[in-house]
Amino acid sequence: QVQLVESGGGLVQAGDSLRLSCVVSGRTFSRYTMAWLRQAPGKEREFVVGIKWSDGSTFYADSVKGRCTISRDNAKNTVYLQMNSLKPEDTAVYYCAAGRFSGSAWSSQDYDYWGQGTQVTVSS
């Protein structure tokens, strides 16, 4: 079993930056893929960005390329999502997820473990 705990959400203004954190605990996850997904009110959960824990390679949704960066800290068992130039359309609950595979995956159905989510609200 893997446990994920997100933090760092909040209310910001358009153009601001925010960094989300996801602390990972439980079973060995060095072969897992970690990701951030988000869900806005009335919309389906959508993929934002992912990272292979083994080698740190990343993959991004087109909507956030150039504005978001995912990283991991092996010593702290933590995955980060740095978001810059935030827009009102980035408002959503952001979820950290882990998949029992090592590769790229863009569907929420590919991921096996989920955090409780953290709210990000961007005002215009």
Image (spheres, helix red, strand yellow):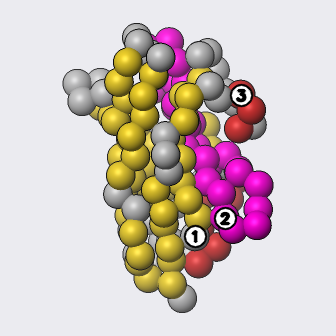
Secondary structure under tag 1 reads loop
Callout 2 crowding tier (Cα within 10 Å): few <14, some 14–19, many ≥20: some
- Left or right: residue 47 versus residue 85 is right
Give the residue drawn at x 76%, y 62%: 43
Q: Of marks 1 and 3, which one's residue comes earlier in the chain?
A: 1
1 and 3 marks in contact (CB < 8 Å): no
Secondary structure under tag 3 reads helix
- Magenta span contains residue 36: yes
Q: Of marks 3 and 2, which one's residue comes earlier in the chain?
A: 2
Work out whether residue 120 or residue 104 is closer to the camera in this orientation and state it: 120
Q: Which quarter of the picture shows residue 97?
A: top right
Residue type marked 2 = Ala
Q: CA distance from mark 1 to mark 2?
A: 6 Å
Residue 77 pos. (x, y %): 31, 27
Work out whether residue 116 or residue 93 is closer to the camera in this orientation and state it: 116
Q: Which residue is mark 1?
A: 91
Residue 14 pos. (x, y %): 49, 81
Q: Which residue is mark 2?
A: 40
1 and 2 marks in contact (CB < 8 Å): yes
Residue 120 pos. (x, y %): 48, 66
Give the residue drawn at x 65%, y 57%: 39
- Magenta span contains residue 65: no
Give the residue drawn at x 77%, y 55%: 44
Q: Which residue is mark 3?
A: 110
- Left or right: residue 75 versus residue 79 is left
Work out whether residue 119 or residue 61 is closer to the camera in this orientation and state it: 119
Q: Is residue 71 visible?
A: yes
Residue type marked 1 = Thr
